[in-house]
Amino acid sequence: MVLIREKINQLTDKKVWLAPLAGVTDKSFRTICKQCGADVVVSEMVSADGLLYSRERSIKYAQFTEIQRPFGIQLFGSDPLKMAKAVEIILTKNPDFIDINMGCPVRKVIKKGAGAALMKRPEIAGKMVSEIKRALSGVHLPVSAKIRSGWDKFNINVIEFSRKLEDSGLDIICFHARTKSQMYSGHSDWSLIKKLKENISLPVVGNGDIRTEEDAIEMFSTTGCDSIMIGRGAIGKPWLFMEIKKVLKNEKKQDIDLKEKFNIIKEHCLLAIKDKGETLAVREMKTHLSNYTKGFNGSSKIRNYVNRSFNMKEILKTIEGLYSE
Ligand SMILES: Cc1cc2nc3c(=O)[nH]c(=O)nc-3n(C[C@H](O)[C@H](O)[C@H](O)COP(=O)(O)O)c2cc1C
């Protein structure tokens, strides 16, 4: 019991998480964010069915390196018993916690009754938590769930839903305060994060729309959440974690210079090449690379070039040119 408490504290005591972002937060990006100061990182979402049928892609998504600890594997699925079975497989990977996806709004996922569809079925969601905890009995591994505010603005059920998960044995709530219908539009309603925190005893990780160190401080101070989670704000800007950690330590705000930023980008590219080989690394890094070139003079021309090129050395030379101006 003490052991799991300590593990939960390691994840929630004023920590800064990198959010799971399918297609973005792969192994190399997670490592870069970790090196920049992210305290906790999570895998991209892994299909429970995929794991049960030994699908290579699902197994690959669950892989991580030691530097990424504490590391969570995020699972999605709709059947509590299958999810519990998938957890047994995941245990062989030795992660630090398991996260259950209860917030994905993508049609393909919802159609199967997974992701945010679970918020319409609190009984199933609760059973999922209790079955997963049962599969983990004696292992002392925290279980978190990543949820939204509810299905749509007429069905905001985050408080009752979270209570159900808490009663079922959940350890941590990660809360992206948008409804499923909002997808990524509008704003994350931070007043709901505050309300959740006031109405539940589980640690709450607040999420949605943190783009700067000021946002991070504001999320902590206005909601009372235990930790924060950053997704899109870190794309093209992994050094955001450095900036946030500095202000959280009450150190003076200090801009990171262009040279240091370029070195981080270069390291990211090299890690990706090491992980997947150059061709795949360039292809899969297009989102990152174009975000690294945003905001500079003539950046759309440069992005066009980066999008057409398959030579990482050339791409890096172009980006270095931008970052040395
Ligand atoms: C491209 C993309 C992929 C995402 N993939 C996942 C995912 O695999 N699992 C998940 O729980 N949330 C996923 N999300 C949601 C994010 O984790 C996060 O909750 C959301 O982007 C709001 O936080 P932000 O404003 O800091 O980005 C994804 C979001 C985006 C934009």
Image (cartoon, helix red, strand yellow):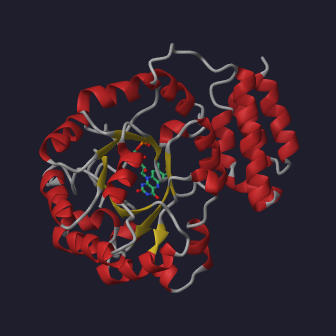
Res. 103 visible in picture: no
Counting every numbered tag in the picture gives: 0
Tell me what residue is drawn at x 37 percent, y 25 percent.
Answer: 217
Comparing 152 with 252, the one in front is: 252
Q: Residue at x 44, y 79 (%)?
A: 88
Q: Nearer the viewer, residue 279 or 77?
A: 77
Q: Nearer the viewer, residue 31 or 22?
A: 31
- Residue 206 occupies quadrant: top left
Q: Position of residue 81 (x, y in %)?
A: 32, 83
Horizontal side, residue 152 vs residue 283: left or right: left
Judged left or right of residue 225, residue 53 is: right
* The C terminus - image quarter: top right
Whether residue 279 is visible: yes
- Residue furthest to the bottom in view is 53
Q: In terms of image quadrants, where is residue 213? A: top left
- Residue at the extreme front of the image, as rendered: 2
Residue 20 is situated, as x and y percent measured from the top left of the image, at 48, 53
In this view, 142 is above or below 226:
below
Residue 256 drawn at (x, y percent): 64, 21
| Farthest top residue in view | 252
Q: Position of residue 304 (x, y in %)?
A: 73, 40
Q: Nearer the viewer, residue 305 or 229?
A: 229
138 is higher (above) or lower (below) than 293:
below
Q: Give the residue at x 26% y 62%.
A: 170
Quadrant containing the N terminus is bottom left
